[in-house]
C-alpha cells in the first residue's frame, strides 16, 4: 500500500455531453477544497462506459473548464486507455476467488428487490457456480455481511450492509466493459487520490468502493459528498434530463452561481473570472456547504 502525505483531489466527469451546472458544482467544490488544503487537483475522464461517452464531449468539457479558469495538475487520466490495468486487477481478484462468473440476465433479475441506486439487489444465483448449461456473462465481486461505515465530511456517518443492501456486484459487465466501481477504485488508487469530493448521487456507491479497495489492498481516501443539483422536477441535472450546457461566454456568472449553490457568499461586484477565483480561493469553506443530498439549482431549466 502506498502512503500519500499530501492532499490530492480530483474531478472525474463522465463525458456523455457538455459540462452542465451539476458537473460544474462538483468541479468547483473539489477544486477549491484541494487548493484550500494546499493540495493538488487532478482530472480524469470517466469514459469506461464507452458507448455512452464521446471524445468530442471530453474535449468540450476540457475547453469549458479552461474558459472558466480551472487549472489542473498533470495529465488528464482517460479510463478508456486503462483496460489492461482493470483486467490485471480483475485477474488478481479471480486468483483470490473473490469474484465469480455470473450468467444472470437483467430480465432474470427484474423481480429482485431494488437497491438504493435502483439496480437489483443480487440474489446470489450464480454464487456457488454457474447453473448447468449457462454461460458466463459478467463477473461479480463476492461481498460478505460485514457493515461498511465511513464518515463523510459533509453528509456525516454512513453505514451499509453490502450483503443485504447491494449484494455481490458487477466488476466486468456482460457487454465486455469494465464497471464504474472497478475503474473508479483503480484510478483513485493509481492517481494517489487522498480526498474524494463529488456529488451525493454517489453516496450509495461509496461502501462498495471502500470494500473493493480493501480487497485490492488500496488505501481508502476521505470522502465529502456535495449536494446534487436537481431541476424543478427533482431530477438530477444530466444529459438525460436535458440539463443546459454551461455558457462559457459568461464564465464569471457560472462560477458565481455554483459558489452560491455550495453555500458560499461571494460579494456583488466580482466582475471577471480572475476576481471570482481570487475571492473563492481565499474564502472557500467546506463547512458552509449545505448538508443536503440534493438541492434545486436556480439555473435549472
Ligand atoms: N464519473 C462520475 C460522474 O460523472 C463521477 C464519479 C466519481 O466522482 O467518483 O457522475
Image: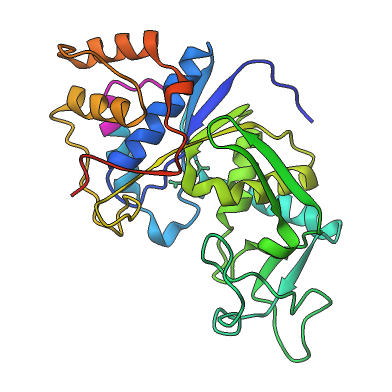
In the image, residue 244 lies at what x, y percent? 20, 47
For the point 31% across and 25% down, the residue is 259
Q: Where, by quadrant of the figure, is residue 177 drawn?
A: bottom right
Asked whether residue 70 is drawn in magenta, I would say yes
Asked whether residue 71 is drawn in magenta, I would say yes
For the point 38% across and 54% down, the residue is 53
**Nearest to the observer: residue 118 or residue 185:** 118
Q: Where, by quadrant of the figure, is residue 62 drawn?
A: top left
Instruction: Please identify the residue farthest to the right as the structure is shown.
Output: 96
For the N terminus, give its image quadrant: top right
Q: Which residues are magenta?
A: 64-74
Q: Is residue 123 above or below residue 233?
A: below
Q: Is residue 67 visible?
A: no
Q: How is the image coloured?
A: rainbow
**Nearest to the observer: residue 253 or residue 74:** 253
Q: Where, by quadrant of the figure, is residue 264 drawn?
A: top left
For the point 76% across and 27% down, the residue is 2
In the image, residue 120 lies at what x, y percent? 59, 71
Amino acid at each position: 500500500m502506498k502512503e500519500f502525505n499530501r492532499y490530492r483531489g480530483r474531478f472525474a466527469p463522465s463525458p456523455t455531453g457538455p459540462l452542465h451546472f451539476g458537473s460544474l458544482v462538483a468541479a468547483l467544490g473539489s477544486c477549491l477544497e484541494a487548493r484550500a488544503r494546499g493540495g493538488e487537483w487532478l482530472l480524469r475522464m470517466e469514459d469506461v462506459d464507452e458507448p455512452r461517452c464521446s471524445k468530442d464531449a471530453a474535449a468540450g468539457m476540457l475547453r469549458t473548464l479552461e474558459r472558466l479558469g480551472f487549472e489542473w495538475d498533470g495529465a488528464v487520466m482517460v479510463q478508456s486507455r486503462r483496460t489492461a490495468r482493470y483486467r490485471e486487477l480483475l485477474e488478481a481478484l479471480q486468483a483470490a476467488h473473490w469474484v465469480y462468473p455470473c450468467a444472470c440476465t437483467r430480465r432474470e433479475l427484474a423481480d429482485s428487490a431494488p437497491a438504493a441506486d435502483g439496480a437489483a439487489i443480487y440474489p446470489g444465483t450464480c454464487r456457488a457456480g454457474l447453473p448447468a448449461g449457462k454461460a458466463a456473462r459478467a463477473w461479480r465481486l463476492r461481498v460478505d455481511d460485514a457493515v461498511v461505515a465511513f464518515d463523510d465530511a459533509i453528509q456525516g456517518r454512513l453505514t451499509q450492509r453490502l450483503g443485504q443492501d447491494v449484494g455481490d456486484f458487477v466488476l466486468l459487465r456482460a457487454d465486455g466493459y469494465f464497471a464504474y466501481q472497478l475503474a473508479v477504485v483503480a484510478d483513485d488508487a493509481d492517481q494517489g487520490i487522498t480526498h474524494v469530493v463529488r456529488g451525493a448521487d454517489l453516496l450509495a456507491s461509496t461502501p462498495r468502493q471502500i470494500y473493493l479497495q480493501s480487497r485490492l489492498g488500496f488505501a481508502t481516501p476521505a470522502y465529502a459528498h456535495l449536494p446534487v443539483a436537481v431541476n424543478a422536477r427533482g431530477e438530477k441535472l444530466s444529459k438525460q434530463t436535458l440539463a443546459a450546457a454551461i455558457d462559457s461566454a459568461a464564465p464569471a456568472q457560472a462560477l458565481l452561481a455554483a459558489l452560491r449553490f455550495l453555500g458560499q457568499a461571494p460579494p456583488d461586484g466580482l466582475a471577471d473570472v480572475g476576481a471570482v477565483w481570487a475571492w473563492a480561493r481565499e474564502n472557500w469553506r467546506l463547512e458552509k456547504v449545505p448538508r443536503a443530498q440534493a438541492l434545486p439549482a436556480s439555473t435549472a431549466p
